[in-house]
Every structure is written in structure tokens, then in C-alpha cells.
Amino acid sequence: MRLSLRDVAKSYGRARGLRPTSLEIGPGEVVGLLGPNGSGKTTLLRLAAGLLRPTSGRVELDDAKPQRRRDRFAFLSTSAVFPAAMTHAHVARLMAGLFPDFSPDRFARLVERLDIHDRPFHALSRGNQTKLQLAATLARETTLYLLDEPLAGIDFMAREEIIDAVLAEFRADATVVLSTHEVKDAEPLFDRVVILREGEVQLDETTTSLSQRGTSVVECYRGFMQ
């Protein structure tokens, strides 16, 4: 799926969440969306998911508004939670009922791979709650994944497990936009990096191009954040 932002801006009253931004993200790309808190990452992802409407400009998924493509993408939000009493089986039934592209087999495989305890959601640690939400999102066999901070609150060893699971499970033609503060851990995933600061794009470059310039994503990110 192709994600297009054309001169998209978002304001919250007098505050600017995103300044006029144009991006084209095509099939098969894994894009790292980087920046400090308040830089506009979540705003951009929520605009792409159709949960926010732009103040100006156009957001399109394959030439249609996101609201018309809700069955074609998966969105992982930092604020999403499952009902307190839900176990793995409950989550699988809920997701299968909501999304025809949800794969129970893929979900079970991810749950096992990520070693998520089979307890009611409220009884899981924050890290296991995040992993369960991520497993449910990745178990959708779709063509666009919008992942907002999937590594937040995850310890180092679990982050490695998640990176390995993401690398193993994404379809080659899937479009992925992933925001994170864990730049070093997530760097192996990225084909391209977009760095935001104060609602503006500071960098939009492929990791191949960065490598040819003799710099890593981490080094580049640090340079923009200084």
C-alpha cells in the first residue's frame, strides 16, 4: 500500500502538531519515524490512520482517504489496551471478529515467540501488555502497518525478540511506518528514516544512502537532536 501526505499540517488550537509535510511511502518500505517527544510522530501516524483529520493538505492510502481503507491497515497505538479480563484466547476471538485478515495461527506463533504469559490482561506486566498488543497487530495479514512506539516499556532482551519477530513476520510487500525512541535497537528494521523535530521533517533519507555517506541512523539522529 502507498501512503501519501501532501502538504499535510495539523494544528491543535494555536499549537502546531505537524507543519506542512509531504511524504510518499511505497510498498515494501520500512520507515523509521524518529524524533523527540512532541516532535509530531504520533500526530503523523494518527493522521495516516484516519484518527485525526488534517488542518490542511491531503492524506491518502492508495488514492483514498484513510477512513475508507480501515480494513487495509493495522494501527498500534500507545494508548490502546484490551479489556482487563482478556486472556490470549479472548484477544484472538475479538480480533478475528473485528478483522477478517487476522490470522489466529500467526497470533499464536507470535505469542509463543515473544513469550507472553497467558494471564488476564490486567495481570500482565507493562512489557507483556505491549507485546500482546503488538502480537495482535502483527497477526493481521495486511499491507500497511502503523506502529507507534512498539518498543516502549520493553527491556533490552525483549526488544531483541520483538525486532526478530517483526523481521520474520512482515510480508515483503508490506508498508511499515514505525516510530520509536529505541533507535539503536530498531535500526536493523529500517529501509528509510524520517526525522521530525517541532513538527517539521528534518531528514528523509534511505539507510543505504546514510551508509554510503559513512554514517549510521543512530549517529545521524544524534546529530539532529544536539
Image (cartoon, rainbow, N blue to C red):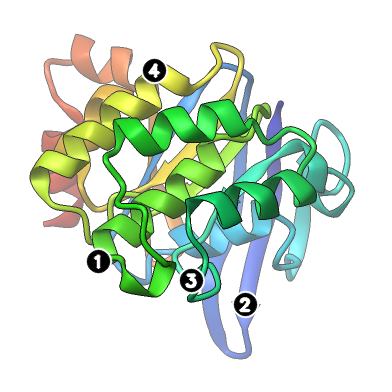
Estimate the spatial distance between the alpha carbons at disc 4 and disc 2, rounded to whole Å.
38 Å
Q: Specify whether residue 59 is in view.
A: no
Q: Position of residue 163 (x, y in %)?
A: 28, 31
Say which element carries label 1.
loop
The numbered mark, 1 or 2, whose residue comes first in the sequence reads 2
Q: Taking 179 as reference, is 36 left or right?
A: left
User: Which SS class for mark 4?
Assistant: helix
Judge whether 175 appears above or below 122 on screen.
Answer: above
The residue that mark 2 highlights is 11
Residue 192 visible at all:
yes
Marks 4, 2: nearer the viewer:
4
Which residue occupies the foreground of this view, 106 or 31? 106
Residue 115 has which mark? none
User: What residue is disc 3 on?
Assistant: 79
Q: Quarter of the image for the C terminus: give it.
A: bottom left
Q: Are marks 3 and 1 in contact (CB under 8 Å)?
A: no
The residue wearing badge 1 is 125
**What amino acid type is highlighted by mark number 3?**
Ser
Contact (Cβ within 8 Å) of mark 2 with mark 3: no
Residue sitting at 46 percent across and 53 percent down? 133
**Quadrant of residue 8 within the rendered picture:** bottom right
**Mark 4 belongs to which amino acid?**
Ala
- Give the CA separation, mark 4 to mark 3: 26 Å
Q: Nearer the viewer, mark 4 or mark 1?
A: 1
Q: Residue at 76% of width from left, 67% of height from top?
A: 53
